[in-house]
Amino acid sequence: MSEHDEQVALMDWINLYKREMPSLALIFAIPNQGGQGKGAIIRGQKMKREGLKKGVPDLFLPVAKGEYHGLFIEMKYEKGRPTDDQVRWLNALTEQGYCCGVCQSFEEAKDLIMDYMNLSLDGDDEDEVKFNYQFDRN
């Protein structure tokens, strides 16, 4: 599956699971410029003038939990890594009190959301999604 397919699968799961956890209905995607051709270029220029910022994470769940103001998720495909711009955003958002995670599948994103909502985040577990660490390009 592609990054797009993984994010769609996550949103499909959220649309089903929000009956059990209504605050999940608040999650939304943050559009980033995509596509090709003249139309995409014009659309991208308009979006930049409207406030589009390069590197902003893909998803935001504006639900405060514990010490966090909300959860930002950057979706990556398989072994994809955040870009330099994404790293800067993830670090800046973490410093502002948000929980941030980089997820490489629907399952990782679902697990991060459930851990966040249940306040059972444990940064010491090697198998868990990485969150709120100093993101870097290494």
Image (spheres, helix red, strand yellow):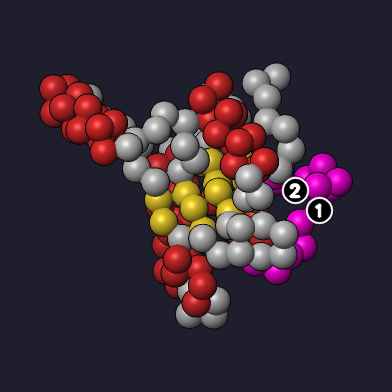
From the top left corner, tell me how far across and down residue 51 is, in percent: 32, 37
Q: Nearer the viewer, residue 77 or 60?
A: 60
Mark closest to the chain's N terminus, 2 or 1: 1
The residue tagged 1 is: 122
Left or right relative to 49: residue 37? left
The residue sitting at 71% across, 43% down in the picture is 132
Task: Report crowding for label 1: few under 14, some 14 to 19, many 20 or more residues within 10 A (C-alpha).
Answer: few
**Residue 46 in which image quadrant:** top left
The amino acid marked with disc number 2 is Glu
What residue occupies the far bottom of the structure in this picture?
20
Quick check: can you spot residue 43? yes
**Residue 88 in which image quadrant:** top right
From the top left corner, tell me how far across and down residue 87 is, in percent: 59, 29
Q: Magenta residues: mostly which secondary structure?
A: loop
The residue tagged 2 is: 128
Q: What stretch is highlighted in magenta?
A: 117-131
